[in-house]
Amino acid sequence: MKQLLLTAALLSGAAFLTNASAQTTPAPAPTAPAPSTAAPAPAAPAAAQDPATLVGRVGKENLTLGEFERAFRLAAARVVNSQGVPFEDSYLSEFAAARPDFLKQFVRDRAVYQLARARQQADPAEVDKQVADARSGFETDEEFTQALNATGYTDTADLRRELERQLIVGAYLNSVQERFTFGDALVAGYYNLHRADFAREQEACVKHILVPTQTEAQAITKDLAGGADFAKIAAAKSQDPGSAAQGGDLGCFGPGQMVETFDTASFRGPVNAVQTVQSQFGWHVLIVTKRTDAGTQPLADAAPIIRDQLGKEAAQKYLDSQVVRLSTESFPAVVTVAAPAPADK
């Protein structure tokens, strides 16, 4: 069962190329502790293979073992990172049994990439900018390399290849989706048939600045009243590292998810007005930017979501029809390795 779950998670993460492009520039390596279980047992070693070994083919384009290994490593890293854990090569053995199934996804992704390259090109300046933006968050090249490795990249060139591919595929997928339009009657019909999908809980959207003392909170409140920028103050002074970089934005949440005083201000206090409350964490200067009641989302709010969903479904069917027209082959025996030995109890 564990292996089935790992395989499902891996393939789910790998499917990003057939959806909107994902942001994969490295963040600082997660600091959450690794699971307390024993380190994964290494997979039985396979005979050394040439990275140029053929693992598949899309039309006349050969897909190599080296390309497969890079994609497999990134997909595994996404699963590991989603648990708040930095990626290490040792985790690859946990996904060994998924390699043949992942090869099918890899070949399909490359088929989509081939279709995209025939119609789109990446702007080198945009790739350079994204790489530079990623690097700017680290003081040294060594720290940047560590972050790259912790998110599955081997080096900057690896990151650049992935960013370029995402830009090309993302632009192509957007262009495909934009071909499909859906009238108001169709959208309303979908809404009426799927009303249960648009039920929502009560929710508040809040931004805050956390400081240690009431005096500091009062000073910030005075500055805000004088027209100071909330996001800039949050970035400079908030003691909440999780929201300071986002201008204090906490996103939206339901009742009972925050400490009592903060929860009360979020769901009973005024909207778009500065409030100050104290919790065990310090003093919060907060603004409720939006509050929604529980109930069914109105059609006017649901319509853009419905159009996006219908567009993605139509684009997916179109992609499937185009991929089928390409001649594809895969050779799973080449990527198959022995599963890791069971850990000692």
Image (cartoon, grey):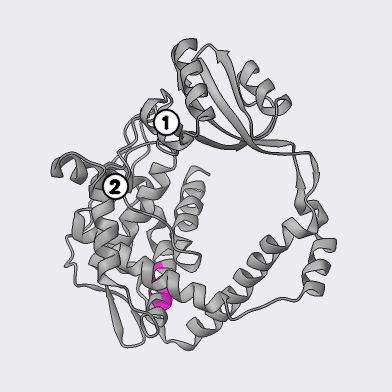
Relative depth, front residue between 197 and 62: 197
Residue 73 magenta: no
Secondary structure beneath dot 1 equals helix
In this figure, which residue is indicated by the disc labeled 2? 43
Query: In the picture, residue 315 is in which quadrant?
Result: bottom right
Secondary element type, mark 2: loop
**252 versus 195 height, above or below:** above
Residue appearing at x 30%, y 83% in the figure: 61
| Residue at the far left in the pictured view | 141
Span highlighted in magenta in the image: 106-112
Check residue 233 in the rendering and tell me which mark sits there, or answer none: 1
Please say if 140 is above or below 11. above
Characterize the local packing of mark 2: few (<14), some (14-19) or many (20 or more) Cα atoms within 10 angstroms.
Answer: some
Q: Nearer the viewer, residue 78 or 177?
A: 177
Question: Residue at the location (30% across, 66% down)?
Answer: 126
Residue 168, image quadrant: bottom left
Q: Main secondary structure of the magenta part?
A: helix
What's the amino acid at mark 1?
Answer: Ile
Left or right, 226 with respect to 150, comes to right
